[in-house]
Amino acid sequence: MAIVDRRKFTTGLLGLGAVSAGLNLPAYAQGKKPKVVVIGGGAGGATAARYIAKDSKGAIDVTLIEPTRKYYTCFFSNLYLGGLRDYESIGHTYDTLASGHGVNVIHDWAVSVDGAAKTVELGSGAKVAYDRLVISPGIDMKYDSVPGYSVEGQDTMPHAWKSGTQVALLKSQVENMREGGTFVMVPPPNPFRCPPGPYERISMIAHVLSKKNPTAKIVVLDPKEKFSKQGLFEEGWQKHYPDMIEWIPASVSGGVKNINMDTMEIETDIDTFKADAASVVPAQKAGAICDRAGITDGDWCPIVPATMQSRADENIHVLGDASVASAMPKSGFSANSQAKVAAMAIRGALTGSKVFDPRFANTCWSLIDANDGVKVGANYKAGTDKIEVADKFISKTGEDEALRKETYEESESWYTAISADMFS
Amino acid sequence: MRGAVAALSYICVMGSAFAEGDPEYGQYLSSECVTCHQSAVTGTIPAIAGMNEEGFIALMKLYRSKQLENKTMQTVAMRLSDEDIAALAAYFSALKPPD
């Protein structure tokens, strides 16, 4: 397949240039209504579908393929774990995308992509044609990356890394731990969805245990030597949950050697930890449809930074966790930002609308305890080969309580806003 | 040749972007703002739809020079040129304010 690069990426005017050069006419120049198909209705896909439909004002047919009828966000699922949100508050439907923006929402699985014919095959066997395809499937788990863990084991030690029922299950297991019991968290190796997520999860579980089961312990068996916002989390753990959390990097534990799901024992070089409840988050890769579309290189999908087009197929744009977005973390905010850049590029290519200099942004808020919020964020620009950091910031250790409360309240407001930006 | 056409196209588009208050450019830039600022007030983050144009420009410049606190807003403002801020101000001031 063709490799696209920055010099070839299509703007509306380049589309006209291509016409004069006698190349294939874009759909709009042939008088046809162009079709965009979006696979995945999360932060990347829902935003892309909404922006393409909204901003093209009916000039593009948009179809969204998403198996679930209600989408539970990963972001803020930790706050549900911590008892600070109810489950339904993180659930969203696609009703307004359909009724308000005319998006054709199909609740089915995309099972394969034929890049040459430009069609997507659905679980039902139907085929949907596209001029441009957006693939935003999120992550799949590499269950065998943790010895002894398996897809069957996800009910015993939930990864809970795709929100929904897994998080509800984990919450119940934490709340039903025996008095003085041990919770074991096994975070994933890099790169993974939501870099501060495992540590916010630990914080929220500690928040619950400190109230309901204050003699309980949390052991973190990390395959990494450092983690996102580490100084902020460690300061907060010491302040709010002294002596409850023990973080052990792989250089000390030797890593997880085996998990016995029947006995709830997690074996390392230094000890075998008997868990009363546990969350094991394995290594991750791009959602399986990416392999079937032939757009992966290893576990993830390389992209052209300015347009989020796949390096392997210029008619496909890859958003969010599945993409190699270099400096941008795998986060809902990042996916939402990338979706807007891709939506602009797609509208430019298919309808000749203006295309501006792409800009990306991300902020990740994390909650350490009720009203103790921290954040990290950055602006990004499209380099020739990679998405690059332009400016960045991070909360500081030692900030006063008023600022931390303000940061938490800001995150609550952001959640409402980004949910509307995806689904309203 | 195609590379040159692409480059020229790109410059043309970018050139038009610098016209003060270009609503299409303002709308594109605004897509970053609405991740946090929706048309209705969402908790502590203010709505900016329908905001006075001069007030918007003044506030953004205060964030850019870090005279106003909030690291997110300072970082957002850091890469905005005067033309960018003018385009955003024109775009948001033309929107209906929240009820």
Image (tube, rainbow, N blue to C red):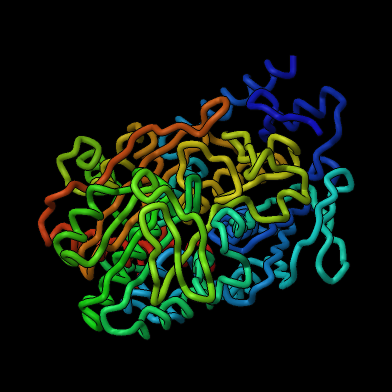
Residue at the location (63% across, 51% down)?
A286
> Can I make out residue A196 in this image?
yes
Q: At which x and y percent is residue A318?
A: 64, 46
User: Of residues B1 and A310, which is closer to you in this image?
Assistant: A310
Residue at the location (15% across, 40% down)?
B67
> Can I make out residue B50 in this image?
no
User: Of residues A391 and B56, which is closer to you in this image?
Assistant: A391
Residue at the location (12% across, 51% down)?
A398
For residue A300, side relative to residue A376 (left or right)? right
Measured along the vertical axis of the image, is residue B59 above or below residue A365?
A: above
Q: At which x and y percent is residue A351?
A: 71, 44
Quarter of the image where the N terminus of chain A is located: top right
The answer to which quarter of the image holds residue A389 is: top left
Q: At which x and y percent is residue B8?
A: 63, 20
Residue at the location (57% across, 29% down)?
B13
Measured along the vertical axis of the image, is residue A222 above or below residue A383?
A: below
User: Of residues A333 and A252, which is closer to you in this image?
Assistant: A252
For residue A99, side relative to residue A350 (left or right)? left
Q: At which x and y percent is residue A154?
A: 56, 71
Measured along the vertical axis of the image, is residue A111 above or below residue B68?
A: below
Measured along the vertical axis of the image, is residue B57 above or below residue A385?
A: below
Q: How many numbered badges does the structure rendering display?
A: 0
